[in-house]
Image: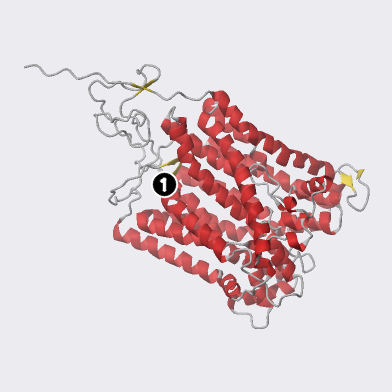
Amino acid sequence: MTSPTPAPAVFAPAPAAPAPALGWLLAAPALFGTLISLLLPTVQTIWLSLQKGGVLRESTFVGPANYGAVLGDGEFWRALWFTVSLIVGPLLVAVVVAPLLALALDRAGTWPRRAGRVALSLAVVTFSPVGVAAAWMRGLMPDAPGLAGLVEGLREPETAPGTLRLIVALGTFGVVCALAVMAFLPALRAPSAPHGFTPSPPVAPPGAVPPGSMPPGAVRPGSVASGFGPRGGAPAPASGAWPEPRRAGGAAPGMLVVGALLAITMVAVGLQAFSMGLVLTRGGPERSTETLAGLSYDYAFRLAQFGPGAAVATVMGLILGVLGIVATVIAVASRLSITLAPRVRHASPRRGEGGGSGAAGMAVGVAALVVVVAVAVVFARPWIDGVLASPDTEAGGLRAQVNTWVPAVAGAVVSVGVAYLAALGIGGLRPLGRRSEWLLLAFAPWLFVGTGPLGVADWQTMRSLGLLNTFLAIFPPFLVSVPALLVLTLLCKGLAERSGRDFVGGVLVPSLPMAGILAGAVALVNGQELFWPLLVAQDASLFPAPVAQLSQLGGFSVTAPDVGAATPLLVVAVALVAVVAAQLLYLDRLVITANGSRPRTPDA
């Protein structure tokens, strides 16, 4: 009796891949937004730096004289040194404390890791630079409690710089640690095969066709698109590709790249420090705590000297542009990729593969989390006391909240929405093939640029349009979020590599939640912005909460600052629910890989 002949594999037609030209079309709004809201203000800032005059006097061209005056003045170099010194504390938290905590949580298993994500989320949604600084200002009151009394050191020029460095490090500990841990955790899900180990590829079933010999337009059985597994069972888990040997190297490449990008980010953000210094010292005493952003603000808007102010802003923008290009090159050259791990419904912990290392690993992870959270709570004690003692003022009223969150949310939707379209075009449709990510270099100079370096030019534009002191003026001036563009492009790239031609189901749908998460993050950042609304809104009825808080500190209408005005309970509650849901349902599944490594399947 002869054995039955195996039936030949049946190929289903693959989804039609969108034309690469669509990628260029989707990237067009981001290019236009970059031109209008980033490139032109940059050119205008450089042009203003070559002129003398401003609002009070007619502008005249003076060439590089402003740069000679600014760079030849000791105030600039003192401000640069002090600004750099402010970065040291948060930088150490980001590259030392955070990776150690992330490693402990990853080795502890699913539930400690998720508990850590939830606990750290509270530090993200409650952080307000102006609110934290206002809370520390309560230390100047006669009955100041605990750590807040350290603020007394801001009174003298000899002790003020060191005191402000300490306050910034303590006040930002929780949010910096939380964001850095959330960046390192996905990198720890990279493959952990031993070095040099190359597992044999699975044997193809009878009648199946190996990769490379399938007819064009056909879908291999076992892929997600076919709906059938290689042996007639369930489809291959989420990768959508013929199984390949995993590359060695583990999580180290991804961790190193993420660490480098975080370090660059901390430096770039620190160079634009403005809010906490303005609230606590306003650059004094005797300019001992002046920052670069504060120096540019003083020249342009306190002394009405746009030329020197624009010169400082140009130098700061040049440094930020170089850092943005370096960060983008690192991300692209290392083949950094973000993707989603498949959901595992009934998983049991596994040793050494992110499922924990037994009771010892869980105990270490839980202990590390408890220690970090306890330290964060101690450092946040001045803010907690300030929120509990906050008076009911107009800074926390409905009008101030509308001025804060309507522009913040609208600006986030526009800037992230435009970035998302470009990410789908560059990372998902890949118009230049494997070299498509290099298109990010067109946006890289503005990766880290905030409103400070472009503030003088943007203020001039608002003045020319007659929009100063209007509700439209307090909307964020950027039409595209370049950081969101970078993250979303790397995500769309990773999803496209695993999904093949299925653009809608494999790239668009899985990446859409990330776009919403980043829009929420940008909205939170916009809501705590002080620099831009401080420039364009002089009418108290237009003040967002941070500006209203600053106004309170400079006046005599209240005896104590409304510390919680920028973080009202309703906003914190809504944001916390959204962030926790995002952490548990989406962010916990992210995988960051570098050098073409493939993600390991997590325990949950």
Q: Choose top left, top right, bottom left or bottom right for residue 498.
A: top left
528, 543: nearer the viewer? 543
60, 402: nearer the viewer? 402
Q: Residue furthest left?
A: 1
Q: Choose top left, top right, bottom left or bottom right for residue 234.
A: top left
In the rendered image, residue 108, in percent from the top left (x then y), is placed at 36, 57
Looking at the picture, the colour scheme in use is secondary structure
Residue corresponding to mark 1: 589
On screen, residue 275 above or below 13: below
81, 226: nearer the viewer? 226
Query: Is any part of residue 546 visible from this angle?
Result: yes
Q: Choose top left, top right, bottom left or bottom right for residue 231.
A: top left
Which quadrant is home to the N terminus?
Answer: top left
In the rendered image, residue 438, in percent from the top left (x then y), is placed at 59, 32
In the rendered image, residue 260, in percent from the top left (x then y), is placed at 55, 47
Given the image, on which type of amino acid does mark 1 rest? Answer: Arg
Q: Is residue 80 left or right of residue 257?
A: right
376, 395: nearer the viewer? 395
Q: Residue at x 77, y 55 (%)?
A: 535
On screen, residue 590 above or below 237: below
Q: Residue at x 30, y 51 (%)?
A: 351
On screen, residue 223 above or below 477: above
Q: Is residue 471 left or right of residue 419?
A: right
Q: Secondary structure at mark 1?
A: helix
